[in-house]
Image (cartoon, rainbow, N blue to C red):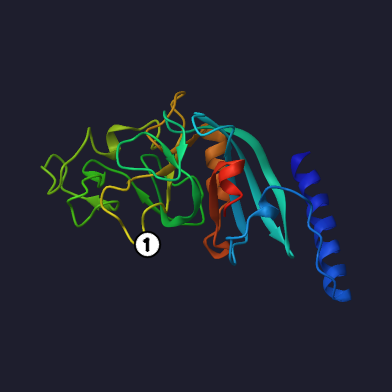
């Protein structure tokens, strides 16, 4: 039913966009959250994660496709866990907030389990795989593979990625603090599977919703993820 409704909405939006283009008039997109964002560039896919307030540890997730000049919701709503201290536009390493803003999706997806059928390059996580959290390291906020059981050449917190098979069964990297990487601003912000409680800063979904979202994402669509309260997102 949801796919049928989404198809009808997409068709209606495409018809409206085509009519607007044909007449030279500006297209009047529906007054939805996604259509109010101004910093989406040429993206054709969008994930919105909206928290009720800055201290909220839950957020509402919706998936959007660009149809003509408008955004049409094609997935959701579903509920995600956010950081234990809510969402912040000034995140710092270890503060347990989820960064607010509009971010890209990394060029590869990862997981302890086999590829669930994503369109992205998929890296199977194994012993010795880390996401570097040490602000002093030249590899800060990057994936690094080291020999299993060895001492990594950077400071670590807890075990490597393979030691967390529930959240990291499958995950995508949210490109927070990447262009450029600022030491201490924050690292390892992922879209991953829920453990049933707030995260250290990531966005986590129930596994079925996570897998369907990861399969839906296409590198060619230049997808973005917008995270924050409605008030925060009005600035993007």
Tell me if 23 is positioned left or right of 225 in this view: right
Q: To which quarter of the image does residue 162 belong?
A: top left
Q: Give left or right: position of 60 versus 162.
A: right
Judge from the rendering whether residue 226 lies leftward or rightward of residue 112; answer left or right. Answer: right
**Measured from the top left, where is residue 126 in percent x and y?**
27, 43
Q: Nearer the viewer, residue 221 or 90?
A: 90
Decide: is 199 above or below 137.
Answer: above
Residue 145 image offset from top left, x and y in percent: 22, 51
User: Residue 75, percent across and down?
Assistant: 67, 43
Q: Crowdedness of circle 1 by 10 Å Cα count: few (<14), some, many (20+)?
A: few
Q: Nearer the viewer, residue 148 or 53?
A: 53
- Who's the residue at 28% across and 33% down the image? 163
Compared to 103, does 85 lie above or below? Answer: above
Q: Which residue is mark 1?
A: 179
- Outermost residue toward the top? 196
**Residue 29: which quarter of the image?**
bottom right
- Of the 4 image quadrants, the one containing the C terminus is bottom right
Secondary structure of the residue carrying tag 1 is loop
Screen quadrant of the N terminus: top right
Report how many numbered discs are placed on residues in the image: 1
Q: Nearer the viewer, residue 122 or 135?
A: 135
């Amino acid at each position: 039913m949801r796919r049928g409704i989404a198809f009808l909405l997409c068709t209606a939006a495409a018809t409206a966009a085509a009519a607007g283009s044909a007449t030279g008039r500006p297209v009047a997109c529906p007054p939805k959250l996604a259509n109010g964002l101004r910093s989406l560039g040429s993206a054709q896919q969008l994930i919105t994660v909206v928290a009720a307030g800055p201290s909220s540890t839950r957020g509402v997730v919706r998936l959007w496709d660009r149809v003509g000049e408008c955004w049409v919701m094609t997935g959701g709503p579903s509920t995600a866990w956010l950081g234990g201290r809510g969402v912040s536009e000034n995140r710092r390493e270890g503060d347990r907030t989820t960064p607010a803003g509009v971010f890209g999706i990394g060029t590869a997806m990862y997981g302890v389990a086999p590829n669930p059928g994503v369109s992205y390059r998929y890296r199977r996580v194994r012993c010795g795989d880390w996401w570097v959290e040490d602000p002093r390291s030249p590899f800060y906020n990057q994936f690094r593979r080291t020999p299993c059981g060895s001492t990594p050449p950077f400071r670590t917190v807890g075990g490597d990625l393979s030691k967390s098979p529930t959240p990291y069964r499958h995950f995508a990297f949210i490109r927070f603090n990447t262009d450029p990487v600022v030491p201490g601003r924050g690292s390892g912000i992922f879209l991953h599977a829920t453990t049933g409680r707030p995260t250290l800063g990531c966005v986590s979904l129930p596994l079925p919703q996570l897998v369907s979202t990861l399969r839906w994402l296409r590198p060619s669509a230049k997808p973005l993820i917008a995270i924050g309260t409605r008030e925060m997102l009005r600035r993007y």
